[in-house]
Image (tube, rainbow, N blue to C red):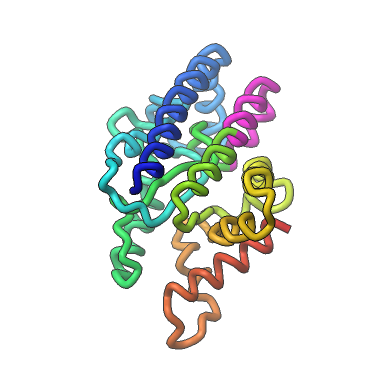
């Protein structure tokens, strides 16, 4: 990273860490962990140790100024593996293993998923399954406010970081970005941040065109969707840009 990029990343990381601490305090006051456990139980999820209702990605602390950041990946929210004390990292469960495997299988992309990628979420609020965020939001207006606040914060600050780093940004998790899905507020805030950050149309479009939308890595949906109806012999980088742009236009109408 350049000196300015490193400074921007450090500012983002420290602000994110502090903001998670604020959300953790709110979560404790609101009894969020009890509601998260209840939502999981109602959803048929086997009992598991709920250790961190709000999850800061500690993998960010391992990034140094000499690292080459080639991609930002935005997943949904921390799941059962991500929230464990021993982890507190994003995309370390099955979906993360599938993602890491994709890049390992395609060395032509020249990306190590654990070294060249900044991994973030649309909200640091944990649920065993993403759809349980709806149940949490419906349980208490203050919980709804916390989830909304976290989405808006993450969207705005992530877009600002992306602008500084200049690498591609992948939004994975197509379904809940559509219409009035769980992450529609994240979607709208993200786009508005690019618009307000760049009043000059050409600059705005240049940066926003580096945002690509894909299906989630879970259940191998990312790969299945990527190669569906792919032209024989088409280069992978071209295919990624084509599919990611197609879904971006569908999501950001």
Residue in view at x 45 percent, y 38 percent: 78
Answer above or below: position of 135 versus 221: above
Where residue 219 appears, as percent x and y from the top left, is: 46, 58
Residue in view at x 27 percent, y 38 percent: 62
Q: Magenta span has 133? A: yes
Where residue 85 appears, as percent x and y from the top left, is: 32, 28
Left or right placement of residue 37 versus residue 101 in this view: right
* 114 or 168: nearer the viewer: 168
Magenta span: 131-152
- Does the image show residue 102? yes
**Secondary structure mostly taken by the magenta-highlighted segment of the chain:** helix
Please state, as top left, top right, bottom left or bottom right, where the C terminus lies in the image. Answer: bottom right
Q: Magenta span has 221? A: no
* 63 or 203: nearer the viewer: 203
- Does the image show residue 182? no
* 189 or 206: nearer the viewer: 206
Residue in view at x 68 percent, y 43 percent: 196
Residue in view at x 47 percent, y 25 percent: 20
Q: Quadrant of residue 131?
A: top right
Answer above or below: position of 210 versus 9: below
Where residue 9 appears, as percent x and y from the top left, is: 40, 39
């Amino acid at each position: 990273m350049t000196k300015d990029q490193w400074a921007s990343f450090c500012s983002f990381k420290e602000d994110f860490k502090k903001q998670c601490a604020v959300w953790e305090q709110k979560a404790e006051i609101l009894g969020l962990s009890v509601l998260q456990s209840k939502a999981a139980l109602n959803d048929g999820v086997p009992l598991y140790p709920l250790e961190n209702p709000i999850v800061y990605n500690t993998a960010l602390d391992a990034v140094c100024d000499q690292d080459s950041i080639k991609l930002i990946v935005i997943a949904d929210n921390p799941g059962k593996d991500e929230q464990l004390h021993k982890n507190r990292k994003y995309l370390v469960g099955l979906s993360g293993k599938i993602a890491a495997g994709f890049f390992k299988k395609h060395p032509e992309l020249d990306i190590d998923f654990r070294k060249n990628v900044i991994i973030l979420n649309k909200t640091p609020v944990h649920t065993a399954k993403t759809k349980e965020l709806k149940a949490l939001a419906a349980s208490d207006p203050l919980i709804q406010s916390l989830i909304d606040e976290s989405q808006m914060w993450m969207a705005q600050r992530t877009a600002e970081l992306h602008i500084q780093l200049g690498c591609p940004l992948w939004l994975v998790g197509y379904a809940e970005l559509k219409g009035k899905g769980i992450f529609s507020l994240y979607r709208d805030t993200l786009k508005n941040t690019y618009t307000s950050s760049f009043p000059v149309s050409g600059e705005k479009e240049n940066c926003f065109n580096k945002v690509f939308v894909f299906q989630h890595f879970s259940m191998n949906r990312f790969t299945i969707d990527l190669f569906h109806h792919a032209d024989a012999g088409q280069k992978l980088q071209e295919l990624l840009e084509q599919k990611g742009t197609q879904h971006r236009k569908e999501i950001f109408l």
